[in-house]
Image (tube, helix red, strand yellow):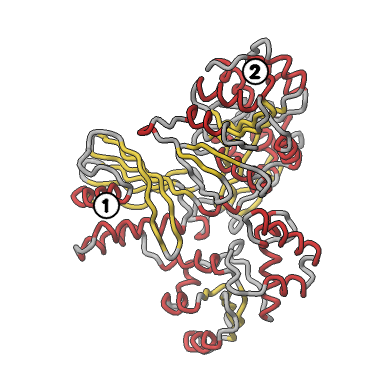
Amino acid sequence: MNMEGIKLKEILLKGDYVSSADFAQAEKYSQSHHATVLEYLLNSGLLTKELLGQAIAENFGVPFTDLSSSPPSRQQVAKIPEQIAREYLVVLAKEDEKKIVVSTNNPNNSKLLKSLKEIFPTKNITVSFSFSEDIEQCFSCYNQPLEARFVRILEHHQHIAPKILEEIFKDALIYRASDIHFEPREKEVLTRFRIDGVLQEVGKLPIAYYENILNRIKVQARMKIDEHLSAQDGALQFIQDGVTIDARVSVVPTLNGEKVVMRLLSEYVKTLSLSDLGLSSKNLNQLSESAKLPFGMILVTGPTGSGKTTTLYALLKTLDNPDINITSIEDPVEYRVTSMNQIQVNSATNLTFAKGLRSIVRQDPDIILVGEIRDKDTAEVAVNAALTGHLLFSTFHANDAATAIPRLIDIGVEPYLAASTLNLIISQRLLRRICENCRFSQTILSKTLIGTIKDLKKYFPETKTTLYKGKGCSACNFTGYKGRIGIFELIILTKELRDLIIISPSSQDIWKLAKKQNARTLFEDGIEKVKAGVSTLEELLRVSPPA
């Protein structure tokens, strides 16, 4: 969040938004943890984005408008010409017959009011403060659909490939897409974004123009442009409006041509804290306590794209300080952290997870992050590292937390070693959040849920229940959802569980004992978020139906 030169300390202390002691603690933390004072205040819960906005607005002597929770409609945004809106970073937030409220990041700009008077000569104008990033998010309303922009670019027949890619990255950034897909068909190329875990079509291109676009991607990702029959992997950087986007690129041959998928590595993940992920207070405490142990393993399981790496990086942020040596080996290194020693797996030089991990152990680490345990060699080295006084974090592909233990044993880890080293196993999925701007509640009879949920009365004992949905609006691209939140299943390795693991139990046996020790399933964690109005029952059933 950009403070744009505003004196944060003076504003917050003057308005008693934080105490001087808390601010001093934030300054101390920022000096030793490679984080800003603002990041500490927000992540620790001492300050919220809304309170920060109110504090800055109070300093300007104007009201605060939270555009992230109440964005204006496309029609409202369009009433201020795009050139004026971008020049002054201003948006029409509210209006009625007599007056309007506009939001800007700099209410003291004297030229702004003069320009607005020319646009709205008969209206009373109130200027409010909003954050720059929220105002810029509203500017997406000025954009034509991506496919219409494709047509305009193709009509000019100049610099087609770079301009098309520029427009695609621009929209991907606005809608916070995690992946960009180029999928060749017989006569056209389908472009799709994965937004909040769901693919959405955004435009089509004539197949005749695809080769130039493909070659530009390959050159930037340092791939062979004359190779068309083999899969290739690479990475590229793209700068859009001053923001650097790192992308992991995969190209594979299909019957209709080479398909490209670009995974966009989000900068905002670096600012996430554990409290942002959706962990309940109980789960958060269990994870924090396990991370304080001097040695052992914490495994995070789940399918690709379920947020495993994000969870581990958020956990490492809580442990990072100058007294600790944190070293990682990953494939690929997704998020660069200056205070960590990060190693990239490289098949060309035979630097595998197992070989890299053996070298890391000789580098005097305190905490080791292994991107993924994939095979017996990596598992054995990881277990030995955890046994010899290191705290080791890793991801592992398993359907749930209980299944991870039999799977580790299946790939060659001795049961007694697994029992000795495992401290905590987490399984997680990501649910789409209901859009806060268009969320509404509806009271329904619980019996109408029969057939959708097993053991209905266990989760909805009342005759009536209140559930929430999103109507769909411009803020959420008319999907009813905006953003995602995690649901979690944790198994703490107690003495009873360690004794059970030694006899190579089934996942059912493990879960039966964990359940007796008050472990909750993914679905049970998700139901709490559904009842709280964070997500919908339909989304939970899509992502993690009850067992």
Q: Is residue 69 visible?
A: yes
- In which quarter of the view is residue 103 placed? bottom right
**Compared to 14, does 513 lie above or below?**
above
The kind of residue tagged 1 is Arg
Query: In the image, what residue occupies the spot 30% across and 35% down?
Result: 231
Say which of marks 1 and 2 sits in front. Answer: 2
Q: Secondary structure at mark 1?
A: helix
Taking the image as drawn, is residue 522 in sight?
no
Nearer to the camera, 60 or 382 = 382
Name which residue type carries label 2: Leu
Q: Where residue 41 appears, x then y in whole percent?
A: 71, 59
* Res. 216 mark: 1
Q: Name the image quarter holding the N terminus.
A: bottom right
| Label 1, label 2: how far apart the Cα atoms are | 49 Å
**Residue 268 x, y percent position in the rendering:** 55, 54
* Residue 501's disc number: none
Which of the pair 526/487 is nearer the observer? 487
| Residue 352 higher or lower than 76, as above or below | above
What is the x, y in percent for residue 352?
45, 30
Q: Residue at x 76, y 63 (%)?
A: 24
Give the numbered dot on residue 417: 2
Mark 2, secondary structure of its residue? helix
Task: Give me the residue at 55% from left, 29% from top.
Answer: 396
Counting other residues with Cα less than 10 Å from the Cα at mark 1, is it few (<14), some (14-19), or many (20 or more)?
some
First reached walking from the N terminus: tag 1 or tag 2:
1
Side of 309 where 318 appears, left or right: right
- Residue lying at 64% horizontally and 20% vertically, measured from the top left: 418
